Amino acid sequence: MGKYLQIMQTFTLQNIPNLDTCVLAALELFSKTKLPSLPISKWKRPLVIGSGNAAAIGQIIFNDHDAVYANENSYQEKLLKIKNIDAVLIFSASGGKHAPLMAKEAKKRKKPVYLITNNQKALAAKELPSQNVFIFPKNREPYTYNTSTYLGMILGKTRENPYHILQFIEKTIAKLNFPNFQNYGAFYLLLPPQFELMREMLDKKFVEMFGRELAYSIFSTEYVKHATTIVKRPDELFISFGDKNTLWGKDRFDLPLPAKADYGSIMAVSYFIMGQIQKSKPPWFKKNIVSYCKEISAIFGNEIKPIVE
């Protein structure tokens, strides 16, 4: 077992790992574990549904396909009003929370329903025939990190080599001269235009990890031109991925991406860097995750644990 996988198997609430460790452990896992492939060409115009980051994952995986997208707020209206949907695909790491309701509603509309999940005991799977459930491997992780879960789904589509990404992070990214993240209270992440769909995932991850403790903006190198830098902060760091930033911000940090990078690479590198920011700040996530899980368990009516086995 790799050293990062060992950490994921043994950590407790007293020594929750940072996000960068979860990235490296996920890449270790996928270097040794075969990932399923989705039969994307089977579906002509599916409705792709997810909540939170799962909605973003669905868009990333189907970004070169004719598909309709929805989340927990809009899926019922899409099912009702868009008639040429030939299947409903539900992306959900846990297969719980909103996913069972989505599956039930889609079945009422007489649509074939498929679940893409990481949970063999997913509640939503009980609504479906077994051949309509795709289960991707995952690591034991802190709740909401969802690193191995969604990275596995992306790599299942892009077929990037997880071992090569792991080597790139360890031998290139980790060797860079990092700025002192502790000095910054605001971060601006610049994404290459071809990875614009990663923006939503990073936005949600910043909220999950840092809440309102840090200010942040995340845009592509094209969108940044549209009045996003009028109001500036003296403690803001501009972090660019792939492309060198020669225009924006006073303090800049440029990160390379692997050759022929796809969404698996940008997710791994950006989450790894977010882990470096996490290390430099007070442990906001770690101090609050237990109480949060108690609150959200009461809201959904089923137990949500701070460590997802």
Image (cartoon, rainbow, N blue to C red):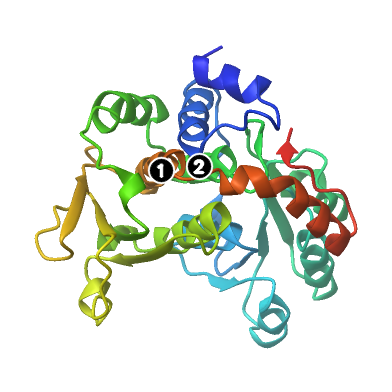
The answer to whether marks 1 and 2 mark residues whose Cβ atoms lie closer than 8 Å is yes
The percent coordinates of residue 69 (x first, y second) are 56, 71
State the SS at label 2. Answer: helix
The percent coordinates of residue 88 (x first, y second) are 68, 65
Above or below, 50 relative to 124: below
The amino acid at mark 1 is Gly
Instruction: Bin the neighbour count of mark 2 within 10 Å (Cα to Cα): few under 14, some 14-19, many 20 and up.
Output: many
Task: Identify the residue shown where x is 79% and y is 43%.
Answer: 305
Q: Is residue 101 left or right of residue 198?
A: right
The percent coordinates of residue 274 (x first, y second) are 42, 46
The percent coordinates of residue 63 (x first, y second) are 43, 62
The amino acid at mark 2 is Leu
Residue at the far bottom in the pictured view: 81
Q: Is residue 53 left or right of residue 201?
A: right
- Residue underneath mark 1: 264
Q: Quadrant of residue 217?
A: bottom left
| Residue 191 in view, yes or no | no
Quadrant placement of the N terminus: top right
Task: Answer with mark 1 or mark 2, whichever residue precedes in sequence.
Answer: 2
State the SS at label 1. Answer: helix
- Please name whichever residue, 306 or 166, is drawn nearer the observer in this view of the structure: 306
- Residue underneath mark 2: 151
Residues at marks 1 and 2, CA–CA distance in whole angstroms:
6 Å
